[in-house]
Amino acid sequence: MTRPATPLTHSRFPAALTATAFVAAIALSGWTAPARAEKADRDQPLAVESDQMQYDDIKQVGTFTGRVVLTKGSIVVRADRLTVRQDEEGWQHATAWGAPATFRQKREGVNEWIEGRARRIDYDGKHETVRLQQQATMQRTDGARILDEIHGNDILYESGTELFSVQGAAGKEATPENPSGRVRMVIQPRTANGQSPGEPAPLKPADRLAPGSR
């Protein structure tokens, strides 16, 4: 059973964040255009497909293994193993593991997606948060292109507000994309009209014909 989302009651930036990670988290609040994650997702049913499933009725926990796919509106999580539980208030919580597990959610009002991957992904339906841990990467894409991306060991994404908190691991969780293991953010350049370099400018109607033209 799903319920309407309620305002966040926890701090946006965990106290354990280092100074470097805290600066990155603030910067990311202006990383994207003014749009939000798909609002309708919070009211959609949660569905899971897998090769095998075990359910503990007493604890209200389902464990899914083998080519797991979780969907909830535009949210899609893919993993090797996934647990789903429902708390006493009816909110749904899921934890996914993979090599890596992946997350995807559409942004409201634009043809863009927030995509992430990590060894572990935690979804909290009550607070509308997604936490990616261990060799984590999160990207903003328009489908085929990566517009912006961030790397870290622990990325907390608040889908309701599109705020990010990021923590590094000082080389302990290095990846080919992020050899240092520290917080690393890549923001693609934009021109004054919001386009990326190399994109053709949109055609505009001329105010009048050029001299000599018919």
Image: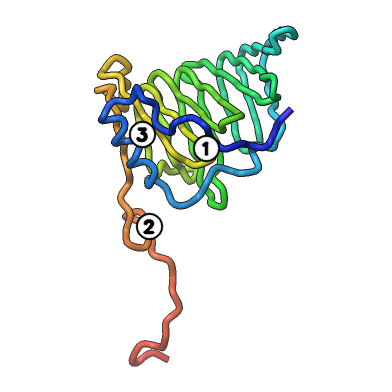
Above-or-below relation of 113 to 195: above
Q: Amino acid at mark 3?
A: Ile
User: Image quarter for residue 146?
Assistant: top left
Kindly identify which residue carries mark 3. Answer: 150
Q: Amino acid at mark 1?
A: Ser
Kindly identify which residue carries mark 2. Answer: 195
Tell me the element at label 1. loop
Q: Are marks 3 and 1 in contact (CB under 8 Å)?
A: no
Nearer the observer: mark 3 or 2; the answer is: 3
Marks 1 and 2, Cα distance to the nearest angstrom?
25 Å
Q: Earlier in the sequence, mark 3 or mark 1?
A: 3
Kindly identify which residue carries mark 1. Answer: 159
x then y, percent, for residue 59: 69, 9
Q: Nearer the viewer, residue 212 or 109?
A: 109
Q: Residue at x 60, y 34 (%)?
A: 75
Above-or-below relation of 38 to 151: below
